[in-house]
Amino acid sequence: MLSTYAPAIVFVVLGTIIGIAFTVLNGVLGTSRPSPAKLDPYESGMASEIKQGFRFGISFYLVAMLFLLFDIEVLFLYPIAVQLRAFGTFALVETIVFIGLLTVALIYVWRRGALTWK
Amino acid sequence: MTGALSHMLTPAVVGYAEPWWMAILKSLVIFAIGLQLVPLVLMAERKILGRFQNRYGPNRVGPFGAMTPLADIVKLLTKESFRPRTAIGWLFTLAPILSIIAAVAALAIVPFGNVQDIFGTPVGFYGIDVSIGPLYVFAFGAVAFYGIMLGGWSSGSKYSFLGSMRAAAQLISYEVAQGMALVGVVITAQSMSLTEIVEGQGGMWYVIPQFVGFLIFMIASFAETNRPPFDLVEADGELVGGYMTEYGGGRFALYYFAEYLNVLVVSGLAVTLFLGGWMLPFGIHPPGWVDPFIVIGKMGLFVVFFIWVRATLPRLRYDQLMSFGWKVLLPLATLNALITAIVVVAWY
């Protein structure tokens, strides 16, 4: 079974080759005339005082946490979806309960205003 | 005859592995074809967009400007390999490579045809056909996410950083809806192998019973590939160039390449999951070697659709984008999955 994944490795290797090839070729073929102003990060002409790790909106973290919750919901639904016909009503009731619980979670998050972008 | 062969082979298809040399050979062929399609998509986009805006589009290099992508590559490769002072060097270099790896690897899953005989060796016309199908795409989507995220973060520029944060939030928000939209298809097909999903569409393409799922999948795909009207990641009006503000030359070419390859992969997935893959309507059964052309032709339709939408719709506002993903698409996709489940169990 694992050998069916083998071509995926070939594709990853090919992707790496093309990625490195473009980067290296650009380094070899490209000109190099650096100047202090050119090396500044883009800031429409002004000097930029940006550093990594500055503060930004909390909404992004919130979305990341919601993603974990709901993406795992989706992942759990896939195995049920494949076997739904085989297990019939039993699996259906379980699915409904499962989605129902997560709907409650969604409604809670919604009412608390986490889905409204600030 | 080929049809009969593929039917004969169908039950054993999932998990079928060619000899190792054939696996490498077919991967190279699919990769080469994918590589050839990207400049075509680029060219088509610029030409068609030109026509939409009452101009010619590129028409200087070669006949009808057909050599423009080649000129672009030469131009980008001879540009300065630039890196801003604030950048974290190795991450800045690694990020676009991650993007292109993810895009190329995702190409492996798109099936261009079922297992067919080539000179006595049965060969699957796809990179891989595995029992996890869509999950493979999501996995490499997550790698592409790192490519964008690291690129924007390691540049050390405000616009890059904001662009990559937006990209992160947008990609993960719409991935949930996209994944949920596919649950309906999986329930109907009873399989996650993409070739089995295509074979399951012999009677009726899933775009008809799963129309809501199709719409959600397409909308989410526009967001996942950062295409207009969801291109807030690189909204030039407010973020200059988004996460690739500081990129130029070969590294920029990689990002660009990855973006268009992703458009192709998503088109291929849409064809496979909803438009019957290599099947033709009205019971037409062409010989097996036509299958890849049918798939590529259908993918072309989606590419034109992508371009058409870009020329037609204005960009969304960011808060609208996030609300739309969570408050409309996700509940709708969940409802779609639930109704599909109930109908399937009640029916059979």
Image: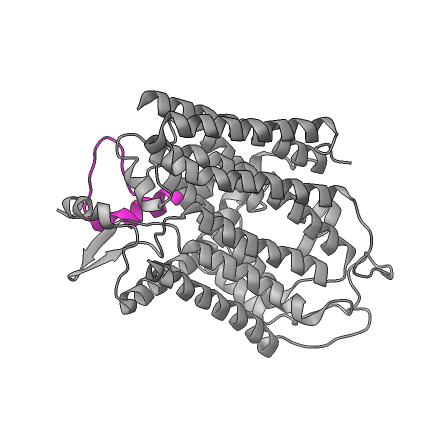
Residue B174 position within the rendered picture, expressed as x and y whole percent measured from the top left: 58, 40
Residue lying at 54% horizontally and 43% vertically, measured from the top left: B49
Q: Determine the residue located farthest toward the left in the rendered image.
A: B1
In this rendering, is residue A88 above or below B143? above
Q: Quadrant of the C terminus of chain B?
A: top left
Residue B300 position within the rendered picture, expressed as x and y whole percent measured from the top left: 40, 44
Residue lying at 87% horizontally and 59% vertically, measured from the top left: A46
Residue lying at 28% horizontally and 40% vertically, measured from the top left: B199
Q: Determine the residue located farthest toward the top in the rendered image.
A: B346
Q: Left or right of B210: which side holds B90?
A: right
Residue B242 position within the rendered picture, expressed as x and y whole percent measured from the top left: 69, 52
Q: Is residue B26 magenta?
A: no
In this rendering, is residue B339 above or below B198? above
Q: Left or right of B297: which side holds B103?
A: right
Residue B238 position within the rendered picture, expressed as x and y whole percent measured from the top left: 75, 45
Q: Is residue B295 magenta?
A: yes
Asked whether B253 or B49 is in front, the reply is B253
Q: Determine the residue located farthest toward the bottom in the rendered image.
A: A28
Q: Is residue B277 visible?
A: no
In this rendering, is residue A54 above or below A109? below
Asked whether A70 or B277 is in front, the reply is A70
What segment is highlighted magenta in the picture?
B278-299
